Every structure is written in C-alpha cells, then in structure tokens.
Amino acid sequence: MKHIYIILGLFFSISVFAQEKASINDFNFESVTNPAFVLLDETPTQLHTPENLKSLSVYLANGFSNTNIAVEINPYWYIDFDEKRTYKKYRGFKERDGEEYIDPLIGLKTDWSFSLAYLEKEFEGFTGEKRVAGIGARTTIFKFYNKSRTKEVSKAITKTGVESELSTEFELYYVLETDNPKPGSGTCKSYAESIELQVQFQDVAKLFIEDEENTSLLQRLNIENITPEKLVEYYLAERCPKVESFVNNPKNIKPNIRIDGAIGYSVLFKEAEINASTANRFGSWLTADAAVRFNSSSYLHIYAIGKFVDDGFNIDEEGVYFNESFWDYGGKLELELNKFKLGYEYLKRSGDGDRFRSVGNISYQINEDITVTGGFGKDFPVDNNLVTILGINWGFDLGEKAFE
C-alpha cells in the first residue's frame, strides 16, 4: 500500500520550530546543520545567535523557564585566538615558498559551532508531550582549494576597493560627509528601491560636484558637467560588483574537497520534570563533498555520507523504553547551475531491516530571500511508501552585511 504525503511549507523567521514528520531538510544531507535539533526531529526556523556571553546567559535563563531554547554559537567569535583578526586570517590564508595557500584545517578553528535545544513535543508512540533537550557540535574538518581557486578567493577578498580616481575621491567625500561606512551589500541591494538612499547619495554627489576643491579633478577628467545622478551611478557601478564578489566568494568559489563532521546527544525526560529519569539518543555524521567546477557559478557535487544513530526514544506497548541502532551510508550527485540545483541521493540503512532512501530533489532560488524546493522518492519506506515534498524557504534581510 502506498501512502502519499504532500507537504507545502512556508518557513518564516517568526516561529521558533517547524514540526513535520518529513521536511525539506530530509532531502539535503550534504551538510549537517544544527545536530542538536536533528536528533530531536526538529527544523529550527529561528536560531538565537548571541553577541556576547551575557546575552547568551540571559537567553538560556529565559529559555529554560519557558521550555523553549534554540541557540547556536560559534566559539571562534568569543575566544581571542588572534591579537588582530583579519578576514584573510579567518579564511586560513598562509604563505609557503612565496605562494599563498589556504590552510586545509582552518575549519577546525573557525567553522565549528555548538547548538543547544530544549522544548516540549510529542513523539510517535508516546502519550502527551515530553520535555527533551539536545546538544550538538559541527565543523568543517578539512577543505582543500587548489592553486587556481586559492588565487580567486584571494583576489575577491583583497581587491575590494574602488580603483578609479573619481570613485576613490567621491567615496572618501561620502564617508566624511555622512559619517557612514563605505557602502556594503545592503546599500547595493536597496539603492534602486530606496528613495531615502537615492536622495542621500545624490545630495552628497551634488555637494561633491559644487565643491571647488574637486573642480580641477572634474575638469581633468572632462566631466565638469556630470550630474549627481550620473556620478552616483558611476560610483556604485564600480563599488557594488566588488562588494558582491567579496560577500559571495565562499558560495561562488567552493573548495575542491570538503569534509564535514557533526555529533549530537539528546535526552528525553520520561516524566514532566527535568530531574526525572531519561531516555537517550546519540548521533554522529561524516560528509564529504568533491566539487567539480564547470564555470564561475556551475558545479557538479559528488557527496558521500556516513551516519550512526543510537536511538533510545522508543517505547513498546507495555511502556518499556528500548534502544535501536543503525548506520546510514550512501551518496548524492548534485548539479548546481547558478540558482538552479538538481540532485539524486541514495542512502542504505543497516541494522534496521536493511531499508533505504532513494530521493530526487530540485531547488530554484527566486531571489536572495526565496527558494523553492521539491523532493520526490522513497524515504526509508516501511510499506513501500512514496514521499513528495514541496516547500518554500522564505527569509528576511536583516540589514547591512559588514564589508570593508
């Protein structure tokens, strides 16, 4: 008998958890995110990322009293590893024999994160909601960039400033006049629709053109009759591509080989008290990605994965808890063509009736905030079930991204 499940999800950053038996994340295992939530069968749609330890302490205190915690932190930003941090250090750039290379183990220092979850939810086979808590960690264990991609990353993060004399002088004038930083990705994305930004830039451009100190520059460039609108257009046309190249370089220039690892542990409180006896669930993941590049925005990803789960969140008809353990192993092929992704994955499960997952998935990024995702196939079927998932990931731009 075939069971067909169609789930249409609209995921907003307003709610803390989205609860489904099958989710879009089930069809994207190339990177394990938030292992504390994975083990609780949860898909967090809003993670608290505290700016400092005080903020973290306050959030955890409130979360425990409300039985609602969804937090992830990257210790790199809390621990002073370097006396002076730079983006090149963060990316792992080093020199050997006069040539730059990226430290393949830099992820162990910069990319690992710690996640914590605490909530009440219903589990299949249990009566009523149970309090559960989870803790997890993930990191990039190894990532290798060949010489060509290393040079591209270096260029993207060092050639960030405008180079023409006109843009250089106008940028300095703008920063001094407005006391604003150099325009970043938020400004570049919003300028066309923001009347306020247009007025601000064009007012500064008008002052720049009328300033006698700039007269000789404009005459020398033979543009003394340039309008404020044209000056701003000229400047942003030079500035914004460099901003985009800097901001998007981790996404556009992928490592040739990347290995990620994650580990998670969760507890289920058998009674409604936090000091009650518990059942436990443990999981670990290892994922490898070989990225074959066709051009600047097209890749063929060849993934391999291994996963182990020891699941104690099971109860029989007599109310006795028991453990089940299994291994998942398999791979995935994914073709990435700019905003379009098409993939197929296969996972074999041992130790649980030799079940398997065979799923095709497709996604298209409409814009930076909206991605349509779909999946179709068999997801570890018990009764030859068929699973179809259609979802829309909807995010919100929360402001200017830092760029210097």
Image (cartoon, rainbow, N blue to C red):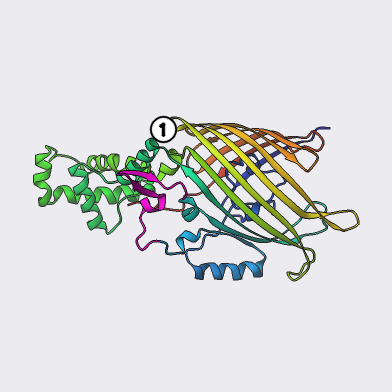
Above or below residue 266? Residue 154 is: above
Task: Choose between 7 and 228: the one closer to the eye.
Answer: 7
Residue at far top of view? 294
User: Quick check: 210 left or right of 253?
Assistant: left
Residue 38 rendering spot, x and y as whole percentages: 66, 51
Residue 64 rendering spot, x and y as whole percentages: 65, 68
User: Quick check: 161 left or right of 274?
Assistant: left
User: Quick check: 61 left or right of 403?
Assistant: right
Q: Residue at x 41, y 53 (%)?
A: 90
Residue 174 rendering spot, x and y as whole percentages: 24, 53
Q: Residue at x 80, y 59 (%)?
A: 128
- Which residue range is magenta in the image? 82-105
Q: Residue at x 64, y 39 (%)?
A: 27
Task: Choose between 285 and 389: the one closer to the eye.
Answer: 285
Location of residue 80 by image quarter: bottom left
Location of the N terminus (image quadrant): top right
To which residue does mark 1 refer? 296
Question: Few, some or many C-alpha atoms within 10 Å of disc 1 (few <14, some 14-19, many ≥20)?
Answer: few
Residue at far front of view? 97
Q: Is residue 251 magenta?
A: no
Residue 156 rendering spot, x and y as whole percentages: 34, 42
Q: Is residue 192 visible to us here? A: no
Q: Amino acid at mark 1?
A: Ser
Q: Is residue 103 magenta?
A: yes
